[in-house]
Image (cartoon, grey):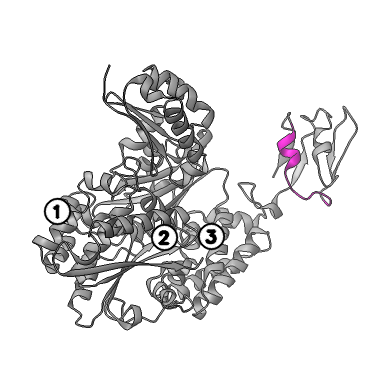
Amino acid sequence: MSSQPIEIKVCLGTSGSAAGGEEVLRMFQHRISEQGIEAQIGRRCTPKKVGCRGFCSRDVLVDIIRDGNKTTYQSVTPIMVERIVQDHIVGGTAIAEWTVTDEYASFHEKQHKIVLGPCGEIDPESIDEYIAMQGYLAARKAMTRMTPDDVIDEVVRSGLRGRGGSGFLTGEKWKVCRREEQHPKYIICNVGEVNRPLAEGNPHAIIEGLLIGGYAICASKGYLYIRERYHRSVERLRIAIEQAREKGFIGPNVFGTGFDFEIEFSFGTEAFICGEETALMESIEGKRAMPRVRPPFPAVQGLWGKPTVINNAETFSNIPIIIGRGGEWFSSIGTKESKGTKVFTLSGKVRNNGLVEIPMGMSFRDIVYGIGGGIEGDKALKAIQVGGPSGGIIPTSMLDLGLDYENLAKVGSIVGSGGMVVFDEDDCIVSVTKFYMEFLQRESCGKCTPCRVGTRRMLELLTKITEGTGGDEDLRTLERLSGVMAATSLCGLGRSAPNPFLTSFSHFKDEYLAHIRDRKCPAGVCTALIIFSVNEEQCKGCGLCKRVCPAKAIAGEVKKIHLIDPDRCIKCGACFRACKFKAIKKQ
């Protein structure tokens, strides 16, 4: 009998936990420890938590590693654990019908996981597991064998661009701050929504990257800016800081070099504007989060008027890898101008939803149909929205466009923090654009007039169009407003807020005109423009539509044709969904 330990890895990222991962882990622990499984099989068997595996649509994901062979189970529930333990762990036979399908392999094979690589493999609450995969060696190398300028030069050589927004070259930003003679200096890591899987799956990489950055710019104080409601991210980062301090990796005299470095949490508000770096600094200083006029830029005059570097968690997670493997290695991935990889949340009408890390330059086709597995229900792809709420809407004609900073800028979009939403033939692009504008208008801080008034006016006009009361002049006004906002808004939120409209109008003009001139929503989504009626040839008079109508807008006797009163119809669609004979028409 083999004495090699058996490992059980349970996904406990946000998605895994939401799907019941905590209960699954407890059930494994109960079965192993309380029922004497280790004694029965004659070897150690360790259930442990890991971070996000990426394939969120199949959570809870569980790996069983037995005799060097890894088997991954999908959609695991607590009730499935007993059979997995008995058949696989004790009996040695995997349960084929519960294991992942070929989609799991296709989801991963086209990705290039650098920062996501350790997520789902190591226990995020164990510094020893991070050290075992060469964790903190890059920080030691930087501080004992490299000068701060050497570190910055390596980051410059890598071509790493900030992964949180505009994509400014990270090394150049650090270089500016390094040259400033004012002290103290500060370095800030913004742990935003899309960075939660990194904080939950490999928090020590963020801590190590922040430490190296602090050394490079000669800052002795680092901040982790995060929303307090990200409880799991906060807890795992807190544990990581305590463990790193116990090992002497942060605190006084790091690695015996005389360099002191401390990390402190700063809990942010529930505001999208805090993704803008100067608004973020205002928040840390205890003020209302509103952007500052630039210049001066934060690298020169930032937190409390001192030189400050701000990058997001994904950017910092790349730093230990760049220092460890070298800038040239990193720059060999991606395109000429957009180096490395980028993490995206792939969501919407795509089969394989989840967290992905792709090399810069990968085509949208490979992302949607390769990694994503195509469109749900084999429906037609209509568009892809990329870059977060203020990103652009990409049509199917651009499926072969490579995703990088330059290409997206050419088509009026941004990489942003890494959101990607897929829309199919059933989605209304005008309604989608209105949805994003609702968010942007709500999140505008109101400091500058172009954004405060512009987003509200754009939302009013888009609402008119979706309600069938818009005119051609409204489209012209939307275009003028977009130009003014892009040119005169104080920060990136206002300047990029018109992107969803400009890109959608450019590629889906016919859909806008149908709403305005024909008073119709081609996708049948905009409620005010929908008309429900009965197809007399298909109606069987079963009365089901009449029974489910909450407004009592349908009249008719059994086995006779029914009719819908348009004045009483509230357009809820209950009759359309209920009719078994497809006799209800939606126009």
Within-10-Å neighbours for mark 3: few <14, some 14–19, many 20+: many
Q: Main secondary structure of the magenta part?
A: loop
Q: Find out whether the residues at labels 2 and 3 contact each other: C-beta distance under 8 Å.
A: no
Which residues fall within the magenta stretch? 567-579
- In depth, the one of 292 and 414 nearer the eye is 292
Where residue 214 appears, as percent x and y from the top left, is: 23, 68
Mark 1 neighbour density, 10 Å: few (under 14) some (14–19) many (20 or more): some
User: Tag 1, which secondary structure?
Assistant: loop
Determine if residue 469 is in view: yes
Find residue 326 and name its label.
1
Q: Look at mark 2 in the image and give the residue it sits on.
A: 192
Residue 94, visible in the rendered structure: no
Q: Amino acid at mark 3?
A: Tyr
Which amino acid is tagged 1?
Answer: Gly
Give the SS element for disc 2: loop
- Compared with residue 2, is residue 208 higher up or lower down, i.e. above or below? below
Tell me: 389 left or right of 173: right
Residue extending furthest toward the right: 557
Residue 386: quarter of image: bottom left
* Residue 442 at x, y percent in the picture: 56, 68
- State the separation of the CA atoms marked 2 and 3: 19 Å
Q: Answer with mark 2 or mark 1, whichever residue precedes in sequence.
A: 2
Of labels 2 and 3, earlier in sequence is 2
- As drawn, 552 above or below 557: below
Q: Secondary structure at mark 3?
A: helix
Marks 1 and 2: in contact by CB < 8 Å?
no
138 lies above or below 485? above
Q: CA distance from mark 2 to mark 1?
A: 27 Å
Q: Nearer the viewer, mark 2 or mark 3?
A: 2
The residue pinned by badge 3 equals 436
Q: Is residue 575 magenta?
A: yes
Residue 63, compared with residue 506, is above or below; it is above
